[in-house]
Image (cartoon, grey):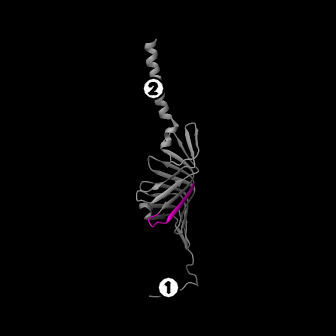
Amino acid sequence: MLRVAIPVTIALILGATVLVRWIDPLKVLVRLPTDAGKLVISGTKVTMESPKLSGYTRDRRWYELNAKAAAQDVTKPDMIELQEVRAKIETEDKSMIFLSATTGLFNRKAGVLTLNQNVTLKSSSGYEMHLEEAVVDTVSGEVVSSKPVAVFTQDATLNADRLEVAKSGEIVRFIGGVVMNLKGLGDASQPAAPKQ
């Protein structure tokens, strides 16, 4: 009986250890941002309240990202769900961009952050952009939105069906149904352009 019981017991203990290590929700804590608030474990999902992440991009620009909550399902370890996302990003000219969105989904493996609902970008240099969604490739710095976008500046508004940002913001393309309204254009109080 012992000849059978001892190997079976060892096999069960080893199997249980491997299983616990595989589904242990606490192992995802290493992958989630530091500076966490309250931690809640429900089933296979680990939710962290008020996570915060800051650092520098590859081109040495400072950033800070925080959210009301971040959740990760241990059965999908590469996906992090974010609620009420807020971010500050330094630009090349040292101005700041402030980003906010109602929800977000970060794919760690692909390095892609998808922001949804009430996505707003505000720049300290004076423009504001409203989007319904934004897909950000954190590796290449490219941003794509296949849904309508509206841009507001002090002197103009611009609306388009689609947005593409390439080369970390060097190239911005507005595609489809592009309408731009310039304020003060044709105003009689403005001096006329000199004739040549």
Q: Residue at x 45, y 13 (%)?
A: 2
Query: Hey, which residue is sitting farthest top in the picture?
Result: 1
Residue ID for mark 1: 193
Residue 121 point in image, percent of width and height? 54, 62
Residue 14's mark? 2
Asked if residue 80 is among those painted magenta in the image, a careful observer would answer no
Q: In front: 39, or 82?
A: 39
Hey, what amino acid is under mark 1?
Ala
Of all residues, the one furthest to the bottom in this rendering is 195
Q: From the image, which quarter does the C terminus lie in?
A: bottom left
Q: Residue at x 56, y 72 (%)?
A: 154
**Going 55% across and 40% down the picture, which residue do you hit?**
45
Which callout, 1 or 2, points at the residue further toward the start of the chain? 2
The magenta segment: 91-101
Query: Where residue 22 sits: x, y (%)?
Result: 47, 34
Report the amino acid beneath label 2: Leu
Q: Nearer the viewer, mark 1 or mark 2?
A: 2
**Residue 101 bears which disc, if any?**
none
Element on which disc 2 rests? helix
Q: Which image quadrant is residue 39 in?
A: top right
Spatial CA distance of label 1 from label 2 is 83 Å
Position in image of residue 190 (x %, y %): 56, 84
Depth check, front residue: 6 or 71: 6
Label 1 Cα neighbours within 10 Å, binned few <14 / some 14-19 / many ≥20: few
Please say if 86 is above or below 170: above
